[in-house]
Amino acid sequence: MAGFVLVNGRPIIVTSPLKNDNLLRALCREPVDHTPVWIMRQAGRYLPEYREVRAKAGDFMALCTNPELACEVTMQPLRRFDLDAAILFSDILTIPDAMGLGLYFTPGEGPRFHHPVRDAASIAKLSVPDIDSKLRYVTDAVSLIRRELDGKIPLIGFSGSPWTLATYMVEGGSSKNFSIVKGLAYSDPKAMHQLLDLLAQSVIVYLNAQIEAGAQVAMIFDTWGGTLSPQQYQDFSVNYMAKIADGLIRNRDGRKVPVVMFSKGVGPKLATLANAGCDAVGVDWTVSLSDARRWTKDKVALQGNLDPCILHADEAVIRQAVRDTLADFGDGPGHVFNLGHGIHPNVEPERLGAVIDEVHRASGGNAFMNNPG
Amino acid sequence: MAGFVLVNGRPIIVTSPLKNDNLLRALCREPVDHTPVWIMRQAGRYLPEYREVRAKAGDFMALCTNPELACEVTMQPLRRFDLDAAILFSDILTIPDAMGLGLYFTPGEGPRFHHPVRDAASIAKLSVPDIDSKLRYVTDAVSLIRRELDGKIPLIGFSGSPWTLATYMVEGGSSKNFSIVKGLAYSDPKAMHQLLDLLAQSVIVYLNAQIEAGAQVAMIFDTWGGTLSPQQYQDFSVNYMAKIADGLIRNRDGRKVPVVMFSKGVGPKLATLANAGCDAVGVDWTVSLSDARRWTKDKVALQGNLDPCILHADEAVIRQAVRDTLADFGDGPGHVFNLGHGIHPNVEPERLGAVIDEVHRASGGNAFMNNPG
C-alpha cells in the first residue's frame, strides 16, 4: 500500500512497489508479459464521466488547475479499462501560461493567448517560470495521482516541446499554415533560438518537478514538428528536445525514468528524433511500425500507432487492426501500444475497450497480474 | 500567332508552336534550358489585381464560373513574373458541385456542401456529371486561356483526386481529423470504393475535356492523401489516381500530355505514388528532394518543394533557399521548381519575383528566350 506524509505541508509519497511495470520495461526495450497499452487523451471528452466533471468545473483551465479534479479525471479511464499506464491530466500550454501570456479557450477554436510574442523584444522579456508559485497545481496533481494509483500502474508526466509551445506563443493560438512562427524562424532565427532555449530550460525544470512529485515516465509532445522542413525540424525542434533529454532526472527511486518523444507527421525523420537522447519515440498512423523500426534501427522503443479513426468502425474491424499493428511491429521487445494520435471526442468508450482487450489478448493474455513487479 | 475558329459554336484552338516548352520537357525528364518554375496558387489572393477582380465578381464561385474572369486571373501572375507555365484558375470541388452537392463558401471556413453524402444510399444516387451542361464554364475558360497564352508557355489543367473530393463530399467541408470520411472507409469500405470509383470516372471525363479544350498538362491534387495509413493510402487514394492515369488522353497535337500527381504529407509513400502511372509527382517541403528522388528511383520527375513560409523572410534568405533546393535536387533532368504547397495570401508579390528570378538565374539564365521550341 502506498501512503503519503506531509513534509513542510507538501505530500511526499511513500512508494508502493509497482505491480504492473510492463510500460517501463517496454520503454527500456526489456521483455514484457504482454504489450503494454495506454491511449493519448485517455482521460477526455469521449467519456461521459469526464464531461460531467468538466461541466461542473466550469472552463477547461479550472479543471486543469484543480489538483483534485485533475486527479479524478486522470483516474476515470482506469476504472473502465485495463490500461497499463496513467497519464497526468493537464494541458500542453501550462508553461507559456505561467510565463504570463494569458492562456484562454474559445469554443471550437482551441487554445489562444492574450499576449502572443512575435519579436525579439517581447522574447527578451520572458523568463523561466517559477514552478512552486506558478505550476504547483501540476506537481500537486502528480502527487495525488501517484497516491491514488497505489502502485498499480506507472504514471506518465508530460510537457509540450519547445517548438510546439513556441508555435502557440508566436501565432497566438492554433494555426493553419504556421506562417507567423515559421516566418519568424526564417527571418530572425536568432530570436527564435533564444525563445526555444528559454523554453527548453523551462521544460527541464517543469518535467523534473513532475518526476520529483512522482511521474515515472517523461513524455514530450511535439505536435507541430511535422510542419517543418527537414533542416528546420533538426534545428528548431529536435535540438531542443535533445537539450531537455540532457537535463532531465533519468533515475528515481532506483529505477530508470524513460523519456518518450512524439513528433506528429515526421515520417522517416523519426531517425533524427531517435538520436535525441530519448528511450522511445511516438509513431503516428501514417507510417508503418516496421518502417519506423527500420528507420530508428531498434535504438529506441516505439509507441503507437493505430489510426484513431478506426474507432469509428465495428468491433471486428477494430480487433483485426489491433492484431495487424502488433504484427507490423513484429517480434522483440520495445513496443508500447497506443493510437497514432489522441482519441476522438465522439468515440464510444466500448470501442476503446475492445482495443485494450485485444492488445492484451493477442500479445500474451493478462499474465501481468502474476508479475511480482 | 494562335487563333481560334468556331466549330458548332465552340472555340477550337489553332495552336501556335509552344515557345517555352521547358515545363513539358522537365515533366518528361528531358533536358531543359533552365529549371522551369510555376507556383501553386500563383493566381490568387496575394496579388492586389486578383483581389480587385474577386471583389467585382462577388462570391468565389461567381469568379470560377465566369470563363472571361477565370481567364483574366489566370493571366495576372504572368504579367508580373517570368513563369514557365499557366495553371487554369478554378476550384478543386467543381465535380461534386456538378453532381448536385451544392458547393458554397463561408468566410474563414473554406468550402462547404449543402448536401454531403454519408452512406451507401446517397452514394448510389450519384452519377458522373455531364461536362457539357454542368462544367462547360471550365472548358470554355481553358480555351480562352490557351488563346490568350498565344503559345508562350503551356497551360496546366487540374482536378482534385477522388479521395480528396470524397473527403469534402462526406465531411461536408474541411475537416480537422477526417473522422467521418475515414470512419466510413473503415466501416463500409464497399460504399467508399463505389464513391471513389465514380469520382475516378468523373475525373477522367473532366480532365479529358480540359485536355481537348487545350490543357497541355493534367495535374491531380490529392490534398488529403497524407491523412491515411499506408494501406489506406494505397487502397483509397493511389489506386484511384492510377485508374485516372489509365483513362486520360496522354498525347495531343503530336505531343505527350504529362500527368502530375501531388499528395501532400506522404513522405516516403511517394514511392507508391510514383508507381501510379504518372510522369511526375509533387513534393511538399517536409522532405528533401534528394530523399524524394531516392524513394522514387528517378522513375518520375519531381515538382517542388520550397517551404511557402520562406516567402515571409527577406530576399537574401529566399534566394539562398532557392539555390539550396536546386542543389538538393542535384544533377540530371526532371525537376520542376515550385513551392511545397500553395503561396500564402499575405505574401508580398516581390518575394515571389525573387524566387522565380533566382530559379532561372541559378539554373541556367534566361536562355530559353532563344529556344526555338
Image: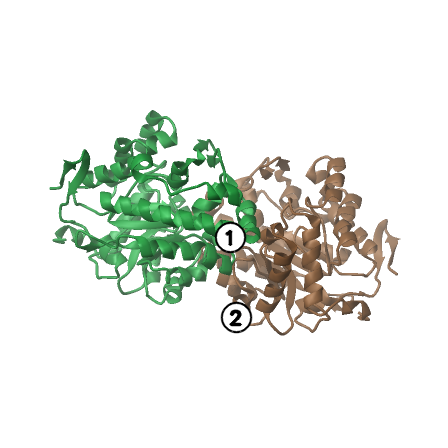
Chain colours: A brown, B green
Q: Is residue A290 visible?
A: yes
Q: Are marks 1 and 2 on the same chain?
A: no
- Answer with the quarter of the image where residue B95 lies: top left
Q: Which label number is shown at residue B190?
A: 1
Residue A312 x/y as whole percent = 61, 50
Residue A73 x/y as whole percent = 75, 47
Residue, disc 2: A294
Q: Amino acid at mark 1?
A: Lys
Which residue is at 58% across, 61% downward? A242
Q: Quadrant of the C terminus of chain A?
A: bottom right
Q: Nearer the viewer, residue A63 or A114?
A: A63
Left or right, residue A176 beside residue A250? left
Residue A232 x/y as whole percent = 46, 55
Q: Nearer the viewer, residue A86 or B194?
A: B194
SS at badge 2:
helix
Q: Nearer the viewer, residue A232 or A332?
A: A332
Nearer to us of marks 1 and 2 is: 1
Which residue is at 54% across, 59% downward? A238
